[in-house]
Amino acid sequence: MKRFLALALTTASIALSGCVSVQSYVDPQYHKASYETVHRLAQPIATKVEVHFQRNGEPLPLADNELRSHVEQTLRATGVFTPSAKVTTPLILVTANNIADLAAARAKGFGTGLTFGAAGSMVDDNYEFTCTYENGTKQQTYKYMHAIHTSIGHNTPPAGLTPTTPSDAFGHVVEDVMLNFVKDLQDKGLIAAQ
């Protein structure tokens, strides 16, 4: 997972300087829907799933499998969709774009490394998700923003947030987005209640 986060560059730049604490925090402002607010179906809908991961708008296919795993796991857990390679429709298409300032991340990591973590830094990974649901003649697209804040070295953590690993934080981000997406589809009436 670290290979496609901007954090990876920061972590790599301080790796030689010793053991430095790295903790990620999922931004809570994007958490809207939950498994409890999504209405499970008696018979989940078999759905084709396509995913694409990007960094600053450029495809990063090495991260597609990680994204797919989180998307499909969340869809199954909603009880609304069952990802299937046997169907062509309906289709859920998810594009995750990591909007990263790589130069700033490297500079922060270098500064933290020089002080052996004493001068901590905070790196933000911002994400823009485009989620599309296609079912015959119906098509609906939603855009969602999300963010991970990662503290490296000695740094004051964001107030009230629970620390986790960068990989787990990304999983939580995808889960939040997919729950919001499924709830929005239901609220729009694109998924029939059973």
Image (tube, grey):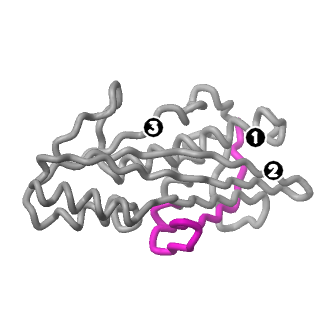
Classify 10 Å Cα crowding around label 1: few (below 14), some (14-19), many (20 and above).
some
Instruction: Return the residue nearer the eye: 131 or 123.
Output: 123
SS of the residue under disc 1: helix
Q: Give the camera-side residue of 102 and 76.
A: 102
Q: Does the magenta stretch include residue 125?
A: no
Of label 2 and label 1, which has the lower sequence position? 2
User: Does 46 lie within the magenta span?
Assistant: yes
Residue that mark 1 sits on: 185
Residue 102's x, y, as percent?
40, 65
Circle 3 residue: 27
Screen quadrant of the N terminus:
bottom left
Quick one: label 1 or label 3, which is nearer the N terminus?
3
The amino acid type of the residue labelled 2 equals: Gln
How many numbered marks does the figure carry?
3
Evaluate if marks 1 and 3 touch, with contact meaning CB atoms under 8 Å apart.
no
Name the residue rendered at 78%, 57% in the picture. Answer: 90
* Label 2, label 1: how far apart the Cα atoms are: 8 Å
- For the residue pair 80 and 116, the one nearer the viewer reads as 116
The percent coordinates of residue 146 (x first, y second) are 53, 45
Please tell me which residue is depicted at 27% across the width and 34% down the height of the picture. Answer: 157
Mark carried by residue 69:
none
In the image, the segment drawn in magenta is: 42-67
Q: In which quarter of the image is residue 83?
A: bottom right
Q: Looking at the picture, tell me which residue is in the foreground, 114 or 21.
A: 114
Q: In this view, does 14 lie to the left or right of 53?
A: left
Q: Name the residue under label 2.
A: 140
Do the CB atoms of the residues marked 2 and 1 lie less than 8 Å apart?
yes
